[in-house]
Structure formats: C-alpha cells, structure tokens
Image: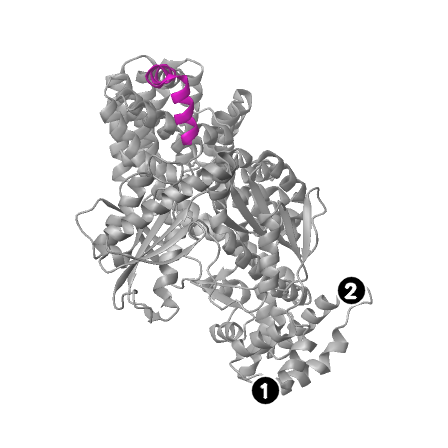
Amino acid sequence: MRAELRAGTVTFLFTDVEGSTKLLHELGAEAYAAALAEHRRIVRGACVAGGGVEVDTQGDAFFLAFSSPGEAVGAAQAITDGLSSGPITLRIGLHTGAPLVTDEGYVGEDVHLAARVAASGHGGQILLSKATRELVGGLSIIDLGEHRLKDIEEAVSIYQLGSRPFPPLKTISNTNLPSQVSSFIGRQRERDEIVSMLSNGARLLTLTGPGGSGKTRLAIEAAAELVPEFKAGVFWVGLSALREPALVSEEIAQALGAKRNLAEHIGEREMLLLLDNFEQVVEAAPGLSQLLERCPRLKILVTSRASLRVVGEVEYPVPPLAESEAVQLFCTRSQLEPDGTIGTLCRRLDDLPLALELAAARTRALSPAQILERLSQRLDLLQGGRDADPRQQTLRATIAWSHELLDDSERELFARLAVFRGGCTLDAAEEVAAADLDTLQSLVEKSLVRRTDERFWLLETIREYAAERLTADPEVAELRRRHALYFLAFAEAADASMVGGEQAMALARVDAEHDNLRAALEWARDSRESELLLRLVAALGHYWENGGFSHDIDVWLPLALECGSSPAPARMSLLWEAWTQAFFYKRDRARSAALISEWRGLAEREGDERHVLLAMNAEASEMMEIGELEQARQTWKATADRAREVGDRFMVAVAVGNQGGIAFETGDYHASLEHWAEGAELHREQSNYGNLAGVLTNCGWASLRLSDPDRAGDYFRESLTIVGRLGAIRSFRSVIALNGLGAALIAKQEAERGVALLGAAAPLEHELGGHFFGKAEHEILDEAAVASKAALGETGFAAAWARGQAMAQDEILTFALAG
C-alpha cells in the first residue's frame, strides 16, 4: 500500500481542462504551456492547503484525495476561483467513498464514479455526488437530479456547488433511448465502428440487414455511447407501426416535442436521431437528406432492411455475431453451459440474434440436440430461391420451426394477432382475435408475443410472419372487419368523453391506439366501407385537433365528407369539424357558409337539438366575423334561450360565454369579462375543461384591455395548466394562451420572459396555420411588441424571441407556469 494514500473514507476530486485542444490552437503552444503550468500551481496549492494528496496526474487532469469532504469542496472552490481570471477552466467532480488501497493506488467503483461525475460537467462547474453532498452543509448547492453515467449501473444523483447556470450535464440522460432489460452481448467491434463513423463525418448512417439480425439493439447501444457528444440529445423514433411515408416527419416531431416545422425546431442543434425500422416508409428517405441540408449539426442513424439510396448515405451492413459471441448469447439466455452441440446449433442459425433468442427460449422444453434435430428437419422445406438472402431464409426457418411447435389454438391466435398494428390490450385481443388468456400467455412465454405494461405486441419481423399465416385464415376478411368495428366503437366512446372530466384520459387512450385507428381507417378506405370511414373520421376529429395532427385531418376529412350523409349523427359531427377547419384554419367563408347550411338543415330534419344549437353558434360566429354584431348577439341570445328550454347546459355555457365577444369587439371590456367569466363558471361546473381553457383565455384578453395584467396572467396560466393536463399543447388553445400570457408579462415589465413566450408560440401558430386572433387581440400583441422592443432593444428582443423558439414542448409549459 502506498504510504501517502489514506485508507478508510476519503473524498476524491477529479479535474479536467475543458476544450484543451481548442485552447491550444487559440493560445499557441508557448502560451498554452504557461497557462497549464499556472493551472498546475493553483491545483497543487489548493490540494496542499486542504490537506489533500495528489494521487495521479495524466496530461492536464488531476486526481486528488482528501480525508475531509469539506476540505475537498473548499479545495475545488479555491481552484475554480484561482483560475477565474485565466484562460483555463476546469470541470471538477467529487465523490466520497471507501475504496481499496493497493500498491498501485486506489481501486474500486468509487474511483470510477468520481471520474464519471467530473466528466459530466462543464468548465467552471463543480459537481458533487450524493455521498459527498450529504457530508457537507452550509453551502449553496443545486440538486441537478438523477443521471445515468456511462459504465455505472444505477442512476446517480448529482449536485452542483453554487447557483451559476450551466448547460445540461453531459450524461446519458438527455435521450429517450429505450432501456434494455437484457444484457448486450458481443458486437463491441461493430458498436465501436458505428460510433467512430458518426464521430468522424458520417451524417446519415444506415444499418442494413435482414429482420432479426440485431440492427435495432446494435443501433441503440451505439447511440447510447454517443449521448455525451450531442448537446441537444440523442432520440429514438420507432417507425415499425407506420405505413404512410408522409407521417415520418410528424412521428419525428412527436418524439422531439417539436411545436413547429421540424427543420426549424432542430435548426443548429447538435442532435442524433435514431430512426428504427425505416424499410416500411423508405419513400420518405429523400426527406432525410433535405433535413440534413437544413440542419448542419444533425446526424441520423437508421436501421432498415435495405439501403435508402439517397445522397450522403453511408451503409453499414450488420454482420452475424461472431461464433463465440453467438454461443455466449445462447448460453446466457438459456442458462446452459457451452458445448459442441450448442456451437453447431448457433452455426445452423447463422449466428443471428433473433434466431438464437427464439432457440434459447425453446430450451425450457427441448434440449439443444432436440432443437437442432427439429431445425434440421424443416430447413430444406423453407428454403427460398437461389437469389434470396440466405440469412433471411434462415430467420424464416427459425420462426417457422418455432411456429410448428405451437398447438392449433396457439397457431390460430398467433396469426390473428397480426391484425393489430402497434399492439393491443387484452380486451381487444379477446374481442377481435377471440384470444384465450391461457393461449395468449403461452405465446408470451414462448417469446413470440411480448407484453409491456398492459399491451401485447409482436416484434415486427415476427408480426410479418404471422401476417402471412393470417392471409390463409378463412376468416381473415371478417377478422379485419371486427378489428375496424372494435376500434370504431373505441373511437366513438373516447370521443363521447372528450367533453367532461374524462377528457385527459380519453386523449391518452386514443394516443395509445392511434396506429390501430389508422389501420382501421386504411381498411375502411380500401374496402369502400363508406359509413365506417365517415364514423371513424367524425369520432377522431376532436382528438386530431387537440393533438395537432393536421396531416391526418387534411388526408381523412375530405375523404369522409364524400361518404354520404348516413348515419346522420356522424355526418353532423363531421360537418362540425369541417366548419371548424374552414372558419378558423382556412378562412374560407364560402365553404364555411355552405357547411353551416347543410349542418343546420340536417340537424333540424333529424331533430338533433345539440347540433342545431352548435350550428346556430357557428352562424353567430360568422356574423361577428363580418361585423354584423347585433345579428350575432341576437343569434347567441336565441341559442342560449333555446338551450335552456331543452336543458342543454353545455350549449348554455357556450352561448353565454360567446356573447362576451360582442362586448369585446365594441370596447365594453367590463361587460365582455362578465359574460366570459359567467361562461367559464358554467363550463367549470360541468367539467368541460377544453371549453373552459378557451373561455379563460378570453377573460385574459379582457383583463389586459382593462389594464389588469396580473389578473390576465392568472387567467392565461390557468388555461395553460388545463391544456397541459389534457395533453393538448400542440393545439390552437395553447397558441392563444401563450400569446396572451406573453403580452401580460410584457405589461408587467417582464419583457424578456414575455417575448420568450411569444417566440415559443409563433412556430406552433405557423404550423397549425390557423387565424386565432381578432382585431383587438392583434392590437394588444402589436402594443406588446413595441413595448418590449423599447425595453429590450432590437438585439435583446431577438435573443428573447430565439430563446422561446428553441424551447421543447415540455419546456414551454414549465417556463410559462413558473412565474
């Protein structure tokens, strides 16, 4: 044991110079050497003053140890203060533990943890582990939360000394990469090659290979290595459930929380996208090249069964596992010791990961020799043509023999589960596929079906094989019809819950089944099931509008409108959504008037009072739009009176609240606030949260006109709180509330925060393409812009606006509600 090293509990301090290579180029060799020498003097002086020991020095990094955590923290602060006026800044990390002391130095996990904590920081930043934090007091310390660190199994709580702001830590937390429940075996060489290619110039890298070759897992592992290198994060986007290339950008935007044009959202950010299972939407590949051209610091890693064949693509064919790795994988999964039979079995499976996983699952019932025997009997029967990919042939054989081991009821259910896209609940499996719970559980245990939370799903490669079996089912047409009818009923039930206290839950349920709903829409369109298509689109309109799914609305709404007028309730709902699009988004007055005429006429003939009242409300809105304010007032009064007569409290609230718009347009802001406040309370009593959020924003605008920005801010924040709870941040309501709150903050002399909110709202407003503000609101916003530019100057205004534009979806709400 080295005599100078202390045993027992010690606090480690690691330092590292930030940007040393860049600094060398900036200062030149001689000046940089002098700066390094001064830096070493300061570090060593602080170490001695704190009673520490210099354990090791490598290049420009120091490894120190202290008996007292307080002395270690003091030394870290002294080092940072001493270097503050010079060109060198250090990232410093501290951790307290009880390592083993050997002749070579300290050994143990505590040493690695301390080094990883330091590596996650930025120049000038001092980071503490939880163990150190708990031993020091009386200091200004910020809790930076839990972080995943490379090679550290458990999440680590990290704290910062002092309140100075720094960028996010360079840990592997800035990512949505799926957590892996099984160990990663082999592929170290391939992983390192992929990391190297992405680190050294490749911007569009495609991992190609057959289904089951391990592309996804390899890509995730490589991407995880790169998280610290991308300041804006590494994000996984699963595309296995998509069939429409046009939806790829929307899917990426959803994963990133983008509230505007995708390229604008990414902009100059240093980001890595992992797009998984791209082969099904390969027609969207040219869009990736365009995205890379517009986003100079973006890199994209793709998994696909075929190359994308676009400019700038670098292809990386994923090879089978090395033989030793294949045996290790099989033995780890099966918990068997390696032998010659297992080696032969792995070779017969071409060392493909999925094939090995499936074979290992069979060892619960069969020995490796029995598996090898059964596999041998079937391979020749399942050979493809001479030009077929032999690895794909082998994988098909692997799935086929696994399929052959199922009994008749398991085979039938396995095939029928392919009707679902994106998985299903137990209820859906039972009703659509006539699933028996025991049979379903058996398929899960045999690794053909997977279960996550409350959903059952198939790997896409296995689902494709199941789909082939499904085509042979004599009831396939009826099964697809049952699937569509089931999700029609699901959508209509969810739509009925969109108004009331269950709205947030209804939106979340539809989110989970959106892929199945799209599949039902496609089947209805392709099968010319006009009534089913009409009803589905009518049921999904509110969900699409709340979620910002403008592409779905643009695609399906015109098709549904061509499907006739039966059933009438669905047709009326469809006309309601179509009028909303024409009035608020397209500003097509002729189209809007025609839709209202058909809508009200149909509602009168059907005796549907709710839709009569909704159409009357739309008529009043049109009147107010063209300045016929008295006619609008009379129509809304008549709507409220008729709603009271039939006992429709919801429409009473709508009509009463909307009369506030008349007073607002005429400048009677006290009266407008009274109307809107009354409407808000009526909506609150009925738990009509979506409408409540809208009316609250109106109250906010009236309060601004009454020179009461504090009250206005309260209204806008409550509206945004509701919008966030409903998961509707990408909706017109959030655009209105964000703009209003921004104007309120500017009126309260909080110009920088206010402009940031205006900047956050602008891209979303552009993306939605709507017209959400009247003349009075535009005047308020124009006045806010003038006032904020006067307060901040043009440069400060532009910086605050840019800050808002750069905010992610979840950041916007947090920022807005913080004040």
**Which residue extends farthest left?**
138
Residue 146 visible within the image: yes
Figure quadrant of residue 83 = top left
Numbered label tally: 2
What residue is shown at x 51% (from left), y 41% (from top)?
270
Q: Which mark is residue 204?
A: none
The foreground one among 441 and 64 is 64
Q: Which residues are magenta?
A: 782-804
Query: How many residues crowd mark 1 within 10 Å: few (<14), some (14–19), many (20+)?
Result: some
Query: How many residues crowd mark 2 within 10 Å: few (<14), some (14–19), many (20+)?
Result: few
Q: Secondary structure at mark 2?
A: loop
Left or right position of 496 against 640: right
Q: Secondary structure at mark 1?
A: loop
- The verdict on residue 791 being magenta is yes
The quarter of the rendered structure image containing the N terminus is: bottom left
The foreground one among 625 and 363 is 363
- The verdict on residue 605 being magenta is no
Sequence-first disc among 2 and 1: 1
The quarter of the rendered structure image containing the C terminus is: top left
**Which residue extends farthest right?**
386
Q: Which mark is residue 388?
A: 2
Q: Position of residue 187 (x, y in %)?
A: 59, 65
Residue type, label 2: Ala
What residue is shown at x 64% (from left), y 37% (from top)?
290
The residue tagged 1 is: 367
Q: Is residue 589 placed above or below 533 in the rendered structure?
A: above
Q: Position of residue 453 (x, y in %)?
A: 42, 62
What residue is shown at x 39% (from left), y 68% (from top)?
104
The foreground one among 202 and 792 is 202
